[in-house]
Amino acid sequence: MKYLGIDPQKIKIGVFNFTCCEGCALALANKEETLVDFLDLLDVVTFREISSDRGEDYDIALVEGSISRDDEIERIKKIRAQAKVLVALGTCACYGGVNNLKNQFKIEEVVEIAYGKDKVETSKVRPLSDVVKVDLEIPGCPVSKAEVEKIVVDIVNQSEINFPEYPVCVECRRNMNTCVFDLGMICLGPITQAGCDAVCPNGGVGCLGCRGPAEDANYESFREILEENGFTMQEALERINFYNALPGMVIDES
Ligand code: SF4
Ligand code: SF4
Ligand code: SF4
């Protein structure tokens, strides 16, 4: 209810960036047809992609990116102390994401190859939940803006928050795509949580599992699909390692 044009119920929100490409924040800022309505619900105190304002007084923190430096640990703890609700936004924040590739090598070698003799502070990549309590994780690389908008509205309205329980294959079949396995490619759609409208298979490429595991993902059945299509477990694991977003994926390699 507004009084003299002021909405006392407006929730204060901050958007924060850690180690990442900032693609999730850009995804929120980009969809102009819904941006004004979305922002009208909220009092945005910090969101550097859309404003130079920097407020410290926020209720909900939307945090993208993973943790890969000591100063980021201190910063995320401060954000956690301020926020009533801390939301991990995107695969980097939820799982470490593509940054996890760095963890597969010796950190000193990675630094030397990337930066030569320059001194660069960097450490093992971690998801936000390794460092602070996270109230909600919204996966995706990038996140679906429609999904984030709906969830923020649900938080404001104190409504139940639901994610699709079914795998990407359901959306893919609904879109009447040709399965990429039939085109000779590997795909993690059978074990990955839906919600992206199967955007990768829509474009003729296999899912990389960026949204994390589907509810009750059937790994045994996935193993059979791989074998039927001539792929090895190693090939599946290499694909999973890209985002490292399927931590529940246990494959019996015997
Ligand atoms: S999840 Fe993807 S789009 Fe989002 S910040 Fe990380 S790399 Fe960028
Ligand atoms: S392309 Fe991937 S997501 Fe689509 S049906 Fe085949 S396995 Fe499932
Ligand atoms: S198809 Fe897979 S990799 Fe592509 S956006 Fe959806 S969940 Fe992520």
Image (tube, rainbow, N blue to C red):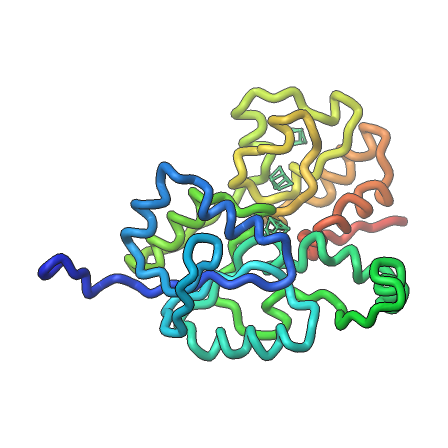
The residue positioned 58% from the left and 33% from the top of the image is 198
Question: Relative to 203, is 5 on the left or the right?
Answer: left
Q: Name the residue nearer the viewer: 63 or 219.
A: 63
| Position in image of residue 143 (x %, y %) | 53, 47
| Position in image of residue 69 (x %, y %) | 69, 72
The residue positioned 43% from the left and 40% from the top of the image is 31
Q: Is residue 205 above or below residue 162?
A: above
Q: Is residue 83 above or below residue 52?
A: below
Quadrant of the displayed image that contains ligand 3: top right
Q: Name the residue nearer the viewer: 92 or 118.
A: 118
Q: Quadrant of the N terminus?
A: bottom left
Q: Is residue 79 above or below residue 171?
A: below
Residue 45 visible somewhere in the drawing? yes
The residue positioned 40% from the left and 74% from the top of the image is 56
The residue positioned 84% from the left and 34% from the top of the image is 231
Question: Relative to 185, is 88 on the left or the right?
Answer: left
When asked about the image quadrant of residue 156, the answer is bottom left
